[in-house]
Image (spheres, helix red, strand yellow):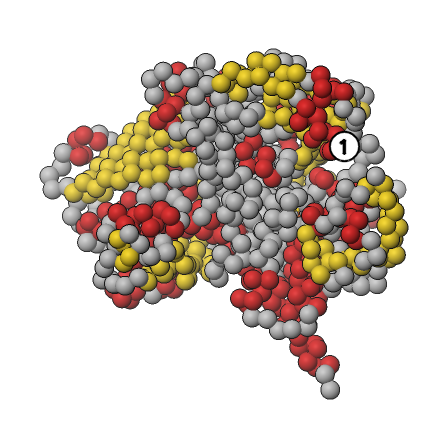
Amino acid sequence: MAIGKSMNRVDAYEKVTGQAQYTDDFFEGEMLTAKVLHSTIANGWVKKIDTSEAEKLPGVVKIVTCFDVPDIQFPTPGHPWSTEEAHQDVSDRKLLNQRVRLYGDDIAAVVALDSVAASRALKAIRVEYEEYLPLLSPEEAMAEGAPLMHEEYPGNILKHHTLIEGDYEKAASEDGLLFVEGDFQTQIVQHCHIEPPISYAYMKKDRITVVSSTQIPHIVRRVVGQALGIPWGHIRVIKPYIGGGFGNKQEVLYEPLNAFLSMQVGGRCVKLELTREETFICTRTRHAISFHETTGVRPDGRLVARRVKIVSNQGGYASHGHAIAANAANEFRHLYQADGALEVDVSTVYTSMASAGAMRAYGIPQAAFALESHMDDIALRLGMDPIELRKKNMMKLGYVDPGTGIACYSSGLEECIDRGMAYIHWAEKRKQYQNQTGPIRRGVGMSIFSYKTGVYPISLETASCRMVLNQDGTMQLQMGATEIGQGADTVFTQMAADSVGFLPENVHIVSFQDTDVTPFDTGAYASRQTYVSGMALKKTAGIFRERILDYASYMLQKPADSMDIRDSWIVCRETGEQLLGMDALAMESFYSLDNSVHITAEATNHCKSNTFAFGACFAEIEVDIPLGKIKVLDIINIHDSGVLINPKLAEAQVHGGMSMGLGYALGEQLLYDKKGKPLNNNFLDYKLQTSLDTPELHVDFVQTVDPSAPFGNKALGEPPAIPVAPAIRNALLHATGVAVNSLPLNPQKLVEAFTENGLLNGGALHV
Amino acid sequence: MTKIIHCTVNGQETEVAIDIRESLADMLRQRLHLTSVKKGCEVGECGACTVLVDGEAIDSCIYLADWADGKHILTVEGLRGPNGELSPIQQAFIEEAAVQCGFCTPGIIMSAVEIVGSGKQYTRDEIRKLISGHLCRCTGYQNILNAVERAVNEAYQFLQQGEP
Ligand code: FES
Ligand code: FES
């Protein structure tokens, strides 16, 4: 069995030798360079653009402005397309925009012989604006008289909905309830994949090829077609290795403009790579979301009446739209069930800041910070252990989401918690760290989460796979699903080996996707691929096996069902005796003069299920009160992601997510000045975690076997980033008694909070 | 302005025509097609472009190609043995699952080559500090530290055994 083994990554050799080719590593003869001119105001209109000086500069090939692009608004998010208009993504931008909706909006583009010429041309372009007030928070955007970011959306509200379970007023009228309220605010952070977004495009005859660092090649093809108004069959998208995405490349960012620019210069090859500074402000960010929670709870800790108001800061363009705030709202429904009512009021509001989009765990890190911090506040008010409170109310096996019908088929949540408690010595340390005094104090905190696996039934879930038998009895495996660093190619190799009966070394996976030849899949997002694309793989393997066994039956003159495939051999099903090597079978099938069959299989699977993954984080911290500094002494994430296909890679995924969670908790934040100009859009000023900031990361798994999954597996890629920030915030509460309700928990904020709470007095310790 | 420089790249004496304004990273990538040299920021913040110049790890994006005249340059492409065998550091990165998207990997491996090449033993915290100029968003550095630590220890033990 290959599944469950920690085999080395199939792409590691290429990656440690420099052979792995990313988008920037191809040389196509002449490659022109494109650069985008970004607005230097956050809100307003481009009145005039003068390119005359720029055009005279040597090396400049073409300049296009927002006045030259097709009058087509298109959607950018990496969602499966909906054929029903009501469910289609918001189309609210053009290739270049006259209406400026954020600092750094795309207003013109230069194609030049090289990047020096392109940069010089950008500097020589003169722009006149009509400037509006920048809208730097949802409150400002919703205020009376605020300028509309998009005419179609009054009040700048992209969407609003209410999620209702039960009757809140009735539930809240129960006698003896204790009411706890809290306001929580998360910050804007960025994905910070180390490879910046990059693509290049060229035309051959009337077809255009776009090579791009994307998580979603088939969706890029569709959106390029929509944005340019050209038939989708005329577009070919190739995805090579990609240097991380984390959701930012689950969006069609600059590929349509890149394709357009190539078309503007007669189909010559044009490369468009963003700088790090552009990546921060012109691509996507994680939504800053505010939460107001009111919870009525019985003295025994049972939640009864819950009311939540969620307001999400969308930025200038809709991107994934309301889907992320809606997902955040669902976490309130999923993680805990009240014995009464839940009411969640959710709004997504346009502002004139960087557009927020998909980022690892899609709204749930925000929800978890609010929800899990609030749970500890409730526990504190009740004088109850926060774990006891959680266990009393959390999702149990058999739960069915009344909105979507998603059921809890397997849950290791309770065991995740128990293991975390044992690891961190919960009971002991909760006691030990009570009533501390002095400048240095310690605390332990925890949090839990649930996470869906894929997007069913909100969106379509479809995937496909192709298997081809080679002459030497090995297999070519082609997935529409994409490798983005998470290890997809390796786990698909393991799945294919076991599902067909091949040795893993006899499975050759094609890592690149090319929409001209790759079977359809919507791509890497929503922690869906091992589940959804794994189903397609399993289905394909069934067909492939059958065809191989049929051929074995022809060769050996034995009934197909008396045989099996194991370790790349045809064996007797009963005794396991090796009857025929796969190499011999394949040679015969290719070159037989009597019966030549090229054995291949391809299948699509339309997945109509979903399942919940779970997990917990436990952290022990030390707080230096005068410095406002948190040091993480020990941290562990425990996950129930079902059966692990490759435990070592699974653990590595968790490390990365925990590190992202630590950055979210402690330091990362994209800052803006009063005019809406980003202040720290570079790696020097944006505090990404370094190895020095990262403690030892501990990981454990509770492996349930999920009955709805192809291999017992559930979501894993995104969840590790979810529970870290609230666990640290709750440890801070335990250590100091101070509840800090906004992220990040950086020294400036903590010193203010400690001062406000009387722990510090003008920098001096008070107690 | 174009200039001809001479340097040794991955053991090979090389003559390259460069633009005097270009970075070493661009020279290695564009002119010599050594694409293991990655660019994540181009301003010396991420370490993805790290190569060794006369044995010292530098950010090649902020190092002028012109300065490499007469120097020895090593990139990941130059690490494998004569028959293509991986160096122990590369092997450690594979076996410790220290590679995910792989974009930071060549740069960190080159720093590891410098660290291991010193022949010294380092504590984990010292290694943490030595690689802190590299940004990695995928791994949380945990397995990278494991890989570098392992390579450091292996090399140290090898050297100790070699001592009379
Ligand atoms: S590309 Fe050189 S340090 Fe980032
Ligand atoms: S492995 Fe992706 S940035 Fe390090």
Residue B28, x across and y down, in percent:
78, 48
Q: Which residue does the image show at 55% across and 46% down from the upper left?
A: A684
Q: As rendered, which of B23 and A708 lies closer to the eye?
A: B23
> Circle 1 — which element?
loop
Q: Mark 1 — on which chain does it sit?
A: A
Residue at the far bottom: name it: B164
Query: What residue lies at 67% left-to-right and 68% top-to-bottom?
Result: B116
Q: Is residue A392 above or below residue A313?
A: below
* Residue ID at (81%, 35%): A28
Classify residue A126 as left or right of residue A288.
right
**Is any atom of residue B85 visible in this view?**
yes
Q: Let me know if residue A549 appears in the view.
A: no
Q: Residue at x 75, y 58 (%)?
A: B53
Locate residue A544 relative to residue A675 in the image: left or right.
right
Tell me the quarter of the picture where residue A479 sits. top right
Q: Is residue A673 left or right of residue A594?
A: left
Residue under numbered circle 1? A114
Identify which amino acid the numbered label 1 is placed on: Asp
**Picture coordinates of residue A16, whole percent (x, y):** 70, 55
> As drawn, which residue projects farthest toward the front?
A762
Quadrant in which the C terminus of chain A appears: bottom left
Provide residue A655's location: percent of width, then percent of height.
51, 54
Image quadrant in which you'd find residue A408: top left
